[in-house]
């Protein structure tokens, strides 16, 4: 009877070893799948992020060009309005005379 018990124990140890191997293989496969999925997700994130950055850069450049154009236009209008002003040289000279030579 002792031999039978030893055989049963050996069989149970063998079953446990096989189960351990199966679990280890499953863990390796799961790790591989998780790493693969993580790599794909990271790549997708990088693509989406790059696309958003390009869109924002494009929008910023468009807005910057529009603002620069408006600024240049306003400066040009201001300079034209200054050039259109009539200069009162005699009035300026008499004002200086009255201030400086009182």
Image (cartoon, grey):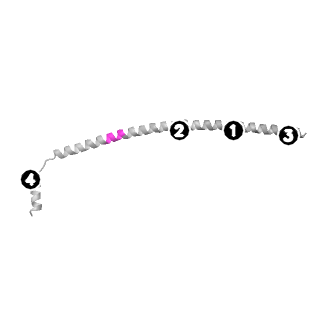
| Nearer the camera: disc 2 or disc 1 | 1
- Left or right: residue 87 versus residue 52 is left
**Residue 70 x %, y %:** 29, 41
3 and 4 marks in contact (CB < 8 Å): no
User: How many C-alpha atoms fall within 10 Å of the one at disc 4: few (<14), some, or many (≥20)?
Assistant: few
Which residue is depicted at the point 75% across and 38% down?
A: 17
State the extent of the magenta-drawn residues as a range.
61-67
| Nearer the camera: disc 3 or disc 4 | 3
Q: How many angstroms separate mark 4 from mark 1 (CA)?
A: 102 Å
Q: How many angstroms separate mark 3 from mark 1 (CA)?
A: 27 Å
The N terminus appears in which quarter of the rendering?
top right
Extreme-front residue of the structure: 3
Q: How many angstroms separate mark 2 from mark 4 (CA)?
A: 76 Å
Camera-nearest residue between 91 and 22: 22
User: Residue 63 colored magenta?
Assistant: yes
| Nearer the camera: disc 3 or disc 1 | 3
> Which residue in the protein does label 2 denote?
42
Secondary element under disc 3, as helix, strand or loop, is: helix
Q: How many angstroms separate mark 3 from mark 2 (CA)?
A: 53 Å
Q: How many angstroms separate mark 2 from mark 1 (CA)?
A: 27 Å
Picture quadrant where residue 99 is located: bottom left
Tell me the number on the disc at residue 6.
3
> Which residue in the protein does label 1 denote?
24
**Residue 27 x %, y %:** 66, 38
Extreme-bottom residue of the structure: 102
Camera-nearest residue between 11 and 77: 11
């Amino acid at each position: 009877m002792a031999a039978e018990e030893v055989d049963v124990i050996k069989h149970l140890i063998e079953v446990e070893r096989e189960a351990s191997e199966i679990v280890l293989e499953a863990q390796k496969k799961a790790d591989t799948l998780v790493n693969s999925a993580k790599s794909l997700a990271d790549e997708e994130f990088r693509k989406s992020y790059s696309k958003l950055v390009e869109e924002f850069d494009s929008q910023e450049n468009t807005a910057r060009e529009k603002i620069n154009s408006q600024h240049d236009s306003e400066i040009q209008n201001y300079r034209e309005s200054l050039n259109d002003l009539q200069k009162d040289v005699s009035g300026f000279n008499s004002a200086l005379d009255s201030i400086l030579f009182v």
